[in-house]
Amino acid sequence: MIRVPLVQGALLAPLALAACGGDRSAPATPRAGAASGAALTGAGATFPNPIYAKWFDAYAKQTGVRINYQSIGSGGGIRQFIEGTVDFGATDGPMTDAQIAQVQGNVVHLPTVLGAVVITYNQPSLKTARLRLDARTIAGIFLGGITRWNAPEIVALNPGVALPATDLVVVHRSDGSGTTYIFTDYLAKVSPEWARGPGRGTAVNWPVGLGGKGNEGVTQQVKQTEGAVGYVELVYAAANGLPYAQIRNAAQRYVESTLASVTAAAAAAPLGPDTDFRVSITNAPRADAYPIASFTWLLVRKTGGDQAKAKLLKDFLVWMLTPEAQHLASELNYAPLPAPVLETVRGRVAGLPPP
Amino acid sequence: MTTAPPAAPPQPAIGRARIPLSLQSRAYGDRAFKLVLTCAAALIPILLGFLVYELWTGSRLAMTKFGLGFVTTSVWDPVAEQFGAFPLIFGTLLSSLIALAIAVPLSLGVAIYLTEFAPRVLRQPVASVIGLLAAIPSVVYGLWGIFVLVPVLRKTAFPFLRDTLGFLPLFQGPIYGPSMLAAGIILAIMVMPYVMSVSREVLLAVPNSQREAALALGATRWEAVVTAVLPYARSGIVGAVILGLGRALGETMAVTMLIGNRHEIAASLFAPGYTMAAAIANEFSEAATDLHFSALTYVAFVLFVVTVVVNAGARLLIWRVARGSSAGSKAL
């Protein structure tokens, strides 16, 4: 009978835990600003986190100004920026007009680097050949209209390869992600059916496929499943040596996803002198442009706030746009901004307060 | 003798003067100890209250927009801002059910073996090893599931099931690997140590006189277990199962890595599914719109309600089971 209280304790404690299951399973959104000694705090996108971390580290070594960045996701970054709990936000998908209205238009989107999404696959029949796809075929696969590898659409683009009559297994991201935003933005641009159906967003209602958590979840699923097709971030795909498809761009040329072709996509961006930089560069018209690319942005206030902090932030932004800092980006496989865009961003940063 | 009634409390002044300092501080210590314990005990209901309040206010937006239809509709479209949680609720309950269907017979068998049949030298080591399973973080289970379990299931176990039981709709359709069944199996492995060790404790608490009486009446070991030990421990065993269920309902990481995360209800266990906890973990950080955010909080609220209802139902079950007198019932 001595054991009875033991049993009771063992039983009740986890029951209480289980009752709180809803809370336990929700990831905590850390509040920025907790780190002591940091001069500036920011929060947002996870995709550019490696380069931001590198920049902040290098900048702190040079100037002693420490910037604390928390990669909690673009949605969280926008939310904290609106709530004013951070000095700057970061996002892979631009703020909507409604969100901008919530801060009374007091925000500038500043492009930092470029991101790209590649289509990776597992098809042993291709051997060393690269899979080639065009916009209609990609949309068809992810809409569920094209279900087999030997579908006429795919065969026509890949002459000389004997593709089997096996099922295509579509793999997409299950977690909300800027990568998904870029990919669905592309699909919505090239396919009216996609625009009417799932649409563009960090998470969408996928017509077909399995959801993998994170780039690594999608990658594992594709690697393990013969016949799988999925999309992942270029930096991740390059770092892990994944095969990825050549995609026919708007100029009807097959383009490999490289830093140069991604930068080329941004070079074609229609950025006037008074642009707000919320420009989509997917399906860019240039002949050498990779079609599934995007800016990633920092969100900075136009006016108001703590003047001392505004000064610190402005100094950092000026530094970030120097050739030295931009060079760090290519080292980490991030496509740097093309020269004309860089010039426009510099002009915009110069106009930020304090003068 | 008549100066003071012996039972009357001493005057404070006198009492303070006479009680040695060590005793006095001990009395303060008692009071402080009681205060600390009371605070600790009060903290739990207060936290729970805050939790419910937070979930309630957080999900208000989605509640007013979708009402109770939220739990019966199946569309989950963050772009069009249409949200329905039925596939999530279904997936949570089904994956937990699969887990229990696998884990309960297995862990009960192990518990009976360890308390009734195993050689004495084996009992403690085996129980400790199974207990160790409970200490493995769930993300490790998830990784193991992706790299080891899923390939085995896809190449061997699932095709075998489809060939032998394929006449059932449960085991039809294409095999991807990540699926409702894969999630159920990983949950079963995670739940087993809990069910096993609590059942074992309950079985150990059955007095030896029960077994001896059955054996004295000419029962075999097996008959003694079935007729004397198990009925005596039944409510404790039900409690063990519910403990496992609670764990399975709230599990997030391993499930989201193996379930395929598809917002759909399929007849086949080979098809991907989704659970409430997995959906929250997946979409919470990138929920861009207020309604999306609110819908996820609503899901958390529903998960909370489901766990409370399941636990309450289970308590009721234990109470019904335990109405006959048995020692095990005192364990709950």
Image (cartoon, rainbow, N blue to C red):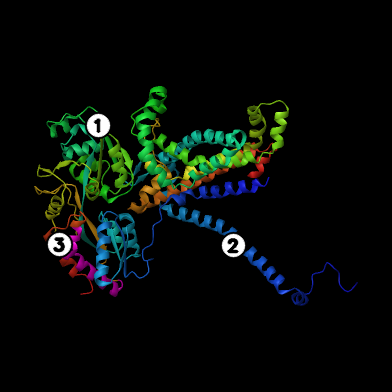
Which numbered disc covers residue A342? Answer: 3
Residue at image coords 69%, 68%: B27
**Same chain assignment for discs 2 and 3:** no
Residue B211 lies, in percent from the top left, at: 69, 33
Q: CA distance from mark 3 to mark 1?
A: 42 Å
Q: CA distance from mark 2 to mark 3?
A: 59 Å
**Same chain assignment for discs 1 and 2:** no
The amino acid marked with disc number 1 is: Thr
Q: CA distance from mark 1 to mark 2?
A: 61 Å
Q: Main secondary structure of the magenta part?
A: helix
Q: What's drawn in magenta, residue-wise?
A: A305-329
Chain letter of the residue carrying label 3: A
The amino acid marked with disc number 3 is: Leu
Circle 1 Cα neighbour tier, 10 Å, few/some/many (<14 / 14–19 / ≥20): some
Residue at image coords 40%, 32%: B269
Residue A182 lies, in percent from the top left, at: 23, 49
Residue A152, placed above or below residue A183: above
Q: Quadrant of residue A86?
A: bottom left
Which numbered disc covers residue B39? Answer: 2
